[in-house]
Image (cartoon, rainbow, N blue to C red):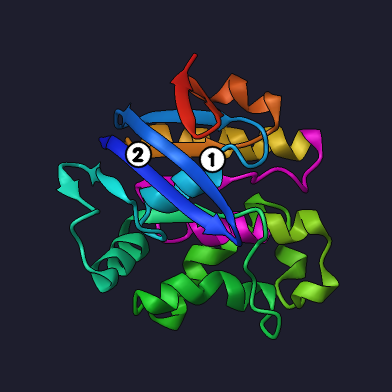
Amino acid sequence: MLKVNNICKSYSIGKTFINANKDINLTVQDGKLIWIYGNSGSGKTTLLNLLVGLDKEDKGEVIWDGDSLTKKTGNQKADFRLSNCGLIFQFFEMIKTQNVYSNISIPLQLQKKDTKTIKNIIYPFLEQFQIAELKNKKPNQLSGGEKQRTAIIRALVTNPKYIIADEITASLDVEMSKFVYQVIRAYIKKNNGIGVFVSHDPIIENYVDSVYKMQNGILEKL
């Protein structure tokens, strides 16, 4: 279960003060997927970063399965993400000098998986997401949609319990978007995990259990 207790986060850009998250409270039970939507700059991505310890809250606490992420050190937070989280960002975060296969294998290498195990894990995903023929291509040889599918696979190969996703279908067509949502929903349900999605794509509403709106740093359940 995910519990967010009175999270606040603010920062400054030049002389502008931004109150990104204002006393946010959120509970997500295991086996559930939620969708957060809102205008650009409303605080959605800031919240995602706080949920996985990529940013530090000003006050409040993030708790995963009874364990406080807020109280962990930076290294402990990194270990938590590697062991438990599948992170999918809208800017892909691919290493330009590495091909598709190598980019996907990075988290598995960090988990000290051997070469044969990595191959056995990755190849079914490449086939499932229809990019097996692209495994040796570099990022500059891929379309936006192909990069996005690569990033999604990379998030799933470690068999994470929690999927945290920011605009994961922005570069995909409608049919591929539906496919991705179906796959991730089935994965979450099968593993009794948790999915937290930020998206402007209304299609996602058909694949989640709860919907939230973020406006001016305030999170509201609809």
Along the polypeptide, which appears first: circle 1 or circle 2?
1
| Relative to 221, 153 lies left or right | right
In the image, 64 versus 115, the foreground residue is 64
Q: Quadrant of residue 89?
A: bottom right
Tell me the residue that label 1 is attached to: 44
Can residue 69 be seen here? yes
Whether residue 26 sits left or right of residue 222 in the image: it is: left
Q: Is residue 163 magenta?
A: yes
Q: Is residue 117 visible?
A: no
219 lies left or right of 126: left
For this view, does 81 lie left or right of residue 100?
left
Three-letter amino acid code at the position of disc 2: Gly
Q: Quadrant of residue 134?
A: bottom right
Q: Amino acid at mark 1?
A: Lys
Q: Nearer the viewer, mark 1 or mark 2?
A: 1
Viewer-side residue, 89 vs 184: 89
- Can you say whether 177 is above or below 69 in the image? above
Name the residue at 47% across, 29% down.
218
Q: Is residue 114 above or below residue 166?
A: below
Task: Give the SS element for disc 1.
Answer: helix
Residue at screen point 50% across, 75% down: 106
Locate the N terminus by quadrant: top left
Q: Which residues are magenta?
A: 149-174
Q: Which mark is residue 193?
A: 2
Residue 176 coordinates in the image, percent (x, y) = 74, 40
Q: How far across and down, in percent of the image, does residue 33 sit?
A: 45, 30
Q: Secondary structure at mark 2?
A: loop
Quadrant of the image occupied by residue 177: top right
